[in-house]
Image: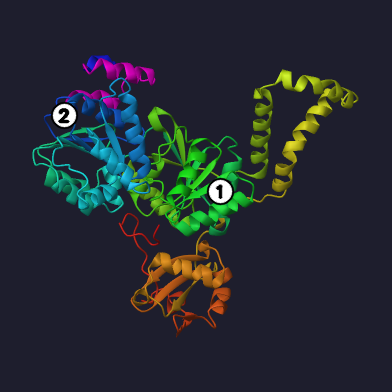
Amino acid sequence: MKKFKEFAIREELIKAITELGFEKPTPIQEQSIPILKKGNMDFIGLAQTGTGKTAAFGLPLIELLDIDQKIIQALILAPTRELCVQISNDLNNYCKYLPEVKIAAVYGGASIETQISQIKKGIHIVVATPGRLMDLIRRKKINISTIKYAVLDEADEMLNMGFQEDIDSILENTPAHKRIWLFAATMPDEIHAITGKYMHNPYELTVGEKNTAAENIEHIYYVVHERDRYTALKRIVDVNPDIFAIIFCRTKAETQEIAEKLIKDGYNADSLHGDLSQAQRDKVMMHYRDRALQLLVATDVAARGIDVNDVSHVINYQLPDEVELYTHRSGRTARAGKSGITISIINTKDIGKIKQIERLVNIKFIYAKVPGGVEVCEQQLMALIKKILKVEINQQGISKYLPAIFEELKDIDKNELITRMVSLEFNRFLDYYRDAGDLNIDFSKKDHIRGKNSGKTENSMFINLGVMDGFDNGKMLKYLMKTTSLPADTFTRINIKSVYSFIDIKEAHFQDVIESFKSEVYKGRKVRVDISEGSKNKKSSSKPERRKFGKKKRSLKT
């Protein structure tokens, strides 16, 4: 394997990255830097997140700059504020000994006037989110007609977030002779559209296989009844005392609900979703990066571009609707060559999705049983012992108290003292898990099969509100939760039509929901609900159509 100095890049860059701890290039860096440093071709680089793509394009980009020209020579587009800031910080770190290189990060949620002022002073590289860059272009506050290189980082995520039109508009404001470098973890069809429209005979480099998850991630799934999903989550967390995880949910409402439950149950957790202000988001991410939080509960959109080191677990509280999203979620762990674990909590209806992900992403899932109370207690006990062994003793601070402590404990022998100390911390887990039941589905008894004799777990409700009333899936979910005061997971499927909708509801809460709407009025109109024929007749056209895994539409907006 080469060393960075063999790439024949500026000594100032070598010195800076050596101080940053860069020793040997990662595979994507080793293979792309020599090609990109020439600056004479379009380029597609496919590699998983956390493999060092920023240095792969950042170092040759800086090398190619004409530093004496105070014009924008390079544009880097990123899907999120966090990734935009991260790339900008990384480039500035690389340029520690090249202070004349000027880099600006422009993104939403920060003062646009400050960003405009920075641009006016003259910059060489602009790192931007599509939305804020479009705003600056419309205001005529930035000129990107001089760029020689355009980098689309995490291009698959940008397209998945709906930035296709913005990317088209931005690239139309750049010169035709520029070079485009595109980096992504997966290669969906939308990227092929970009390559065909804007790139000319691009050099394509794939590190690992296309559309695959990183090899150093272990993929585990647990199968439980829907009612046990949250309890299973707690057991998974408890059996991993040192866990530092991101928990993915499908909707903003579910994200908030799960985070609040975890906080109430004593876990260091918080939520990250689209309803948070930028200041709230920054605060949550600061706490998570500082490890003041152990569990970050997030939607897919809110988690875009998160780059936090040493995430031990990614937990899919619900499987995503799209295969690409599973890959992106998993990529939050096992970064920079480290290992990680992705856990999926599923019910029996999701087993087919697991098989499909295995086939499309070329991975192998491991079926595991949700740990029992004894196993959880054992792991927590050993974690406590390790914590005692590793604790740093402040001799100077504690020494004056020791004589009194020793006098107080003189009649207790060592074994009893240890037992008492451990029990002081450990009794809570013993009490909680003393009568803990088995959450795993017993496949031998076929209690997971829903048939005419096994009992339905949900019913379908008709409601005379739909698209014409301003509803989409997300707004309907909020409306149902507000009207019924029931949590999001009560409503297992929402199917919005033009003037009416069908809502699948857990059977245990079905009558409560019906009762909640008896006197409900929406915008002066009496709300009518009824039992849908789809819950009586499986072949009825009233039943919401089940969408196949992998389609681009989501059932509930995040």
Q: Is residue 29 magenta?
A: yes
514 horizontally vs 330: left or right? right
201 horizontally vs 307: left or right? left
Name the residue beneath numbered marker 1: 233
Viewer-proximal residue among 91 and 183: 91
Viewer-proximal residue among 211 and 48: 48
Say which quadrant the C terminus sits in.
bottom left
Give the label on residue 510, or none. none
Report helix, strand or loop for mark 1. helix
Viewer-proximal residue among 12 and 195: 12
At a point 53% along the width and 48% down the height, the residue shown is 270
At a point 86% along the width and 24% down the height, the residue shown is 404
At a point 56% along the width and 38% down the height, the residue shown is 292
Q: Are marks 2 and 1 in contact (CB under 8 Å)?
A: no
Q: Residue 512, position in %: x, y?
A: 58, 74
Report helix, strand or loop for mark 2. loop
Q: Residue 321, position in %: x, y?
A: 37, 55
Spatial CA span between label 2 and label 1: 55 Å
Residue 77 in the image: above or below residue 515: above
Amino acid type assigned to the residue bearing label 2 in the image: Gln
Q: Is residue 127 magenta?
A: no
Amino acid type assigned to the residue bearing label 1 in the image: Leu
Residue 324 in the image: above or below residue 226: above
- Tell me which segment is drawn in magenta: 8-35
* Circle 1 Cα neighbour tier, 10 Å, few/some/many (<14 / 14–19 / ≥20): many
Q: Quadrant of residue 350?
A: bottom left
The single residue placed furthest to the right in the displayed view is 411
- The answer to whether any part of residue 111 appears in the image is yes
Q: Main secondary structure of the magenta part?
A: helix
Q: Earlier in the sequence, mark 2 or mark 1?
A: 2
Name the residue beneath numbered marker 2: 69
Q: Residue 327, position in %: x, y?
A: 36, 43
